[in-house]
Image (tube, rainbow, N blue to C red):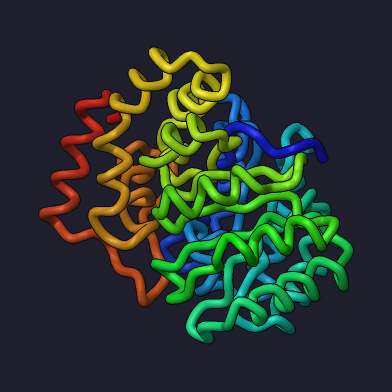
Amino acid sequence: MARLTGTGTALVTPFKANGTIDERALRGLVEWQIKNKIEFLVPCGSTGESATMTRDERRRVIEIVVDQNKGRVPVIAGTGTNSTLDSLDLTHDAKEVGADAVLLVGPYYNKPTQEGFYRHFKRIVEECDVKAVLYNVPGRTASNMLPETTLRLAEEVENVIAIKEASNNLEQIMQIIKYRPKNFAVLSGEDTLTLPIITAGGDGVISVVSNEVPKDYSDMTRAALKGDLKKAKALHYKLFELMKANFYESNPIPVKTALHMMGRIDDSLRLPLTKMSKPNREKLKKVLKDLKLI
């Protein structure tokens, strides 16, 4: 796999009203994303509610995405958990069903040391012999993987190919960009920061908002990567309120609500997530109407 660039969509997982995976809706989302020129797909991340799915369900979601994709774009499957052993099992599953790489979130709740981060990721990548994108999101995991640890993994573990950085710390992200190995990609993990991260030398994004606006957002990312900042800024600010609206409540509550309003999925979520509150739902509806998405 060449260095990851462009926009990868952190796919939602559509559920039916009875809580089961909605395979038809998921296949439809995959087709829509590819038609709108997304560069890669990321099922079973936090936006995909992976933390509330069983191992068999996660395997099945990845299998559906791989099957529907038919090799058109890379599929990077979320297989990280706060248990190294469970992550190994999920990573083996993803490899078996044909994922091109895996997304490994930093262990949540455990609050590992930097050495713990290093050993956790190194063991999974080497034991499974799989290409991996690291995912640093301290707001969800309660611990931050420092640039020194990211760079150590990038330099010492051959199949660590990228990081999704969602620390919201531009100085930290720029440190990784400055000192990274040649083929190591740095991807934004925050939609509102993709433009500044690319201008600082980043390679793209794993995005929430591209679930709703795959064409506009991937166009924005490509324009930024080509140095067309006029076009990139115009699209960035066009979508800015929607990027913020996706976090009126915990992700993926707003994005699934939006996709439901757009007629693409049911708005079913798994506890402990609940349907969007009425006031926030009305605010979100206005943003979608302003963008002519509904």
Quadrant holding the N terminus? top right
**Residue drawn at x 80%, y 36% as measured from the top left:** 2
| Quadrant hosting residue 156 | bottom right
Q: Is residue 288 left or right of residue 27?
A: left
Rendering coords of residue 167 (x, y %): 44, 58
23 above or below 234?
below
132 above or below 10?
below
**Residue drawn at x 57%, y 83% as measured from the top left:** 112
**Residue drawn at x 78%, y 57% as measured from the top left:** 155
**Residue drawn at x 24%, y 36% as measured from the top left:** 241
| Quadrant hosting residue 250 | bottom left
Rendering coords of residue 26 (x, y %): 57, 47
Q: Is residue 14 visible?
A: no
275 above or below 38?
below
Q: Nearer the viewer, residue 29 or 19?
A: 29
Quadrant holding the C terminus? top left
Q: Is residue 161 visible?
A: yes
Rendering coords of residue 123 (x, y %): 80, 75
Q: Nearer the viewer, residue 70 or 222?
A: 222
